[in-house]
Image: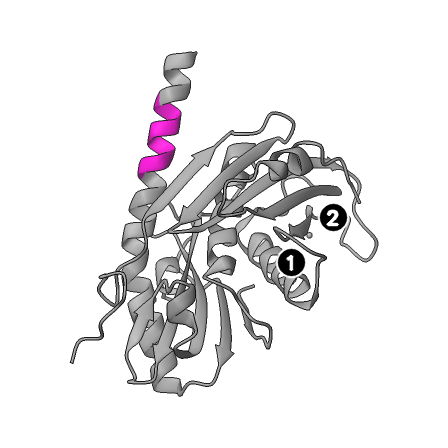
Amino acid sequence: MEIDREDGRTPNQLRPLACSRNILHRPHGSASWSQGDTKVLAAVYGPKPGTRKNENPEKACFEVIWKPNSGQIGKAEKEFEMILKKTIQSICVLTVNPNTTTSVIIQVVHDDGSVSFFIMLDNHVTMSCHPLAIRISSDLRDGLLPCAINAACAALVDAGIPMKHLAVAICCCLADSGYVVLDPNKLEEKKMTAFAYLVFPNTTLSVLPEVEGEPVEHGIITSVTHGVMSVDDYFLCVENGRAATASLSAFFRKNFQQSQGASSKAG
């Protein structure tokens, strides 16, 4: 029996995607990423000389600052920062700019089109970096974490940060009926029993060699779970999520090609 979704999508169908880069003037790189009604803005500052305390000065350091659309930062946002930082460290080349810090600012955008986030991000001047598997207890809202990871990746490219490969993030969730649903909206998330937030290497743009006989595209960069699911259900989420990354990778590639074409014409 096929599961019915209120917005008419199939279980493996993603919400409409949108991405724009180089939208802010002061950051070295910036990007907005939208999936349905979820929208996130990312800004990259750096690399700048010096590393923060407890960071390795022989490698490039990254810091992530999460700005919610309202209210103060809490436990959930701190966990988001940690997951994003570990993910960024996994996909960036840390030996190219040793003893530097790059700041990645994530701003959650209001659905009503508020523009206050442009002021906060464009004026940011604060300086102060292995695959990740983690289970968290915080509430992940409306696929926000994958959207932020995709936005951060696009902003890093816009800033020219050296990267091993691009990454694509996706949310997979488990319904009461046992079906796996991809990229849920807020209404759907309330009906789900467990979630897996997965980050895969971009299969087309990866430049990493095979590791222990496995092509890099067969791996997982980050795996975050919320709720309880069986091992079989988890691997079903991985299988369906990996299959969906083809469309995400194609969207990334098309977006970057269009941006490069526009830059060439402007030059």
- Residue 26 seen from this side: yes
- Residues in magenta, as a range: 254-261
Which residue occupies the foreground of this view, 225 or 200?
A: 225
Residue for point 63% across, 31% down: 27
Query: What's under tag 2, amino acid-wise?
Result: Glu
Residue 180 vs residue 146: left or right? left
Is tag 1's residue or tag 2's residue first in the polypeptide sequence? 2
Query: What's under tag 1, amino acid-wise?
Result: Glu
Residue 90 rendering spot, x and y as whole percentages:
55, 56
Residue for point 28% across, 85% down: 177
- Image label count: 2
Residue with the mark numbered 2: 58
- Say whether residue 70 is magenta: no
Give the prevailing secondary structure in the magenta stretch: helix
Q: How is the image coloured?
A: one colour
Residue with the mark numbered 1: 81
Task: Label 2: state its secondary structure.
Answer: loop
Which mark lies nearer to you, 1 or 2?
1
| Residue at the far right in the pictured view | 53
Give the quarter of the figure containing the C terminus. Answer: top left
